Image (cartoon, grey):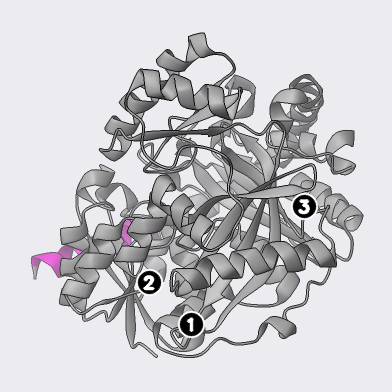
Amino acid sequence: MFNKILIANRGEIAIRVMRACKELGVKSVAVYSDADSNSLFAKYANEAYNIGNPSPSQSYLNIEKIIDVAEKSGAEAIHPGYGFLAENPKLGFECEKHGIKLIGPNGSIIEAMGSKIESKKLMQKAGVPVVPGTAKGVTDIDEAVDIAESIGYPVIVKASAGGGGIGMRTVYEEDELVRAIESTQSVAASAFGDSTIYIEKYIEEPRHIEFQILADEHGNTIHAADRECSIQRRHQKLIEEAPSPIMTDELREEMGGAAVRAASSIGYTNAGTVEFLYSNGEYYFLEMNTRIQVEHPITEIVTGIDLVKQQLQIAAGEELCCEQKDITVRGHAIECRINAEDPMADFAPNPGKITGYRSPGGIGVRVDSGVYMNYTIPPFYDSMISKLIVYGMTREECIARMRRALNEYIILGVKTTIPFHKSMMLSESFIKAKLHTHFVDEYHDEIMGHMAKVMKADEKIAARLKSTFLPSPKIAAVSAAVNNYITNLDNNSKKQ
């Protein structure tokens, strides 16, 4: 096992990796920008290094600075988390060049699976079902029109590079196609530096089902079952659950087998996710995420496998913890992403200072968070505050527990997506598991109706609890004096 690992990320995922390090007796190294100098993850790590400007391009996306800190600190490996550099092949190549282990697949695999066109070709070779579409990038408009006609409308225009739904455009008729291509090319060039696009058949109202993959460096590959990620907004996941409500043992064996085949065929190692679209009994490869997923905790809960510890152990050359026959799914888990966003204002980001914070607890409740009371959420990064994960013996119990946990979760000072999640847990269609990727749009009025009532009730709760976050004048004075004393000690120490 490694002695020291650098975590090239921030927030809750940085803390999540550091927790795994502590359990394995590994020292952790944090890198942080000026905006994150008071962040919890920087305080939690064994060592922390400032890498400058809050701009991601000058801090968390700056490979040169991160490699420099790794070498300076003596870190033997780098864990990229998710987002930022997690699926950037250049980080993998630079790690190889400097003799640092990347906790993930190698750079060439990240590069191949990061291209939607290349990954689709590889999956076809492996015999994994893919959505009908182009086998190469498209730039010629006339060619695009012919392809769309042969596939049949509706089609979806996507950027070959990148992910997260950036630049995607759905087209229902030929007149829209040219504008969609130009728009997607422009967005792709700006976001990813690659304007290549491709076209594929648009599957209406599919379910988004993914399989967690684990593969070691000894040729062993397994899947750790499935997750349903159909509750999305603009291709961004909001709520995930494991297992999928439609999953059967037979379907899991078939889809899971395809996911393992996909990973094995390219020599994949470490943790990854194979994502599928599922509709009317058919499933199609969507993409492969060559990293740990935001929603990995729900898989950990229903399988009992610590996925991040497995990542570290695989990267250190150890064999997988278990075989496919050992994987069992027990109960049900749901994750709600709690973001600093205003759900009543089209989910506009709402960074600012958290003036009151009380997380939920009790049986079957887990909160993965990187914030604390009086912490100021910076405006430069993803708006996630935390992930609220609950477990139940059945899906029905899990939903009831999530309702209870959401009602206990108090965050003051910034607007959050908690009211949205409360509303979702009241939706009859969600309760009946009538899920698909356009669920939030289809049931928009129902969700908004629930949300208006929820937020009115929340105002009363917040007013009632607000006083519990305010210290007495005596305690506040003592706290201020202690803070001043510590500050003076720090200043004198720096002068000396």
Instruction: Give the residue drawn at x 52%, y 42%.
Output: 354
Instruction: Give the residue drawn at x 45%, y 71%.
Output: 268
Secondary structure of residue under mark 3: helix
Residue under circle 3? 405
Q: Amino acid at mark 1?
A: Asp
Report how far apart the C-alphas of labels 3 and 1 lie in the structure.
36 Å
**236 relative to 77, above or below:** above
Query: Outermost residue toward the top?
Result: 175
Q: Which residues are magenta?
A: 483-495
Residue 102 appears in the figure: yes
Q: Amino acid at mark 2?
A: Ala
Image quadrant in which you'd find residue 487: bottom left
Instruction: Give the residue drawn at x 48%, y 82%.
Output: 216
Q: Nearer the viewer, residue 207 or 408?
A: 207
Q: Nearer the viewer, residue 339 or 263?
A: 263
Residue under circle 2? 45
Report how far apart the C-alphas of labels 1 and 2 lie in the structure.
27 Å
Residue under circle 1? 216
Quarter of the image with the C terminus in it:
bottom left
Few, some or many residues within 10 Å of mark 1 (<14, 14–19, 20+) = many
Give me the disc on residue 449: none
Could you tell which of marks 3 and 2 lies nearer the N-terminus? Answer: 2
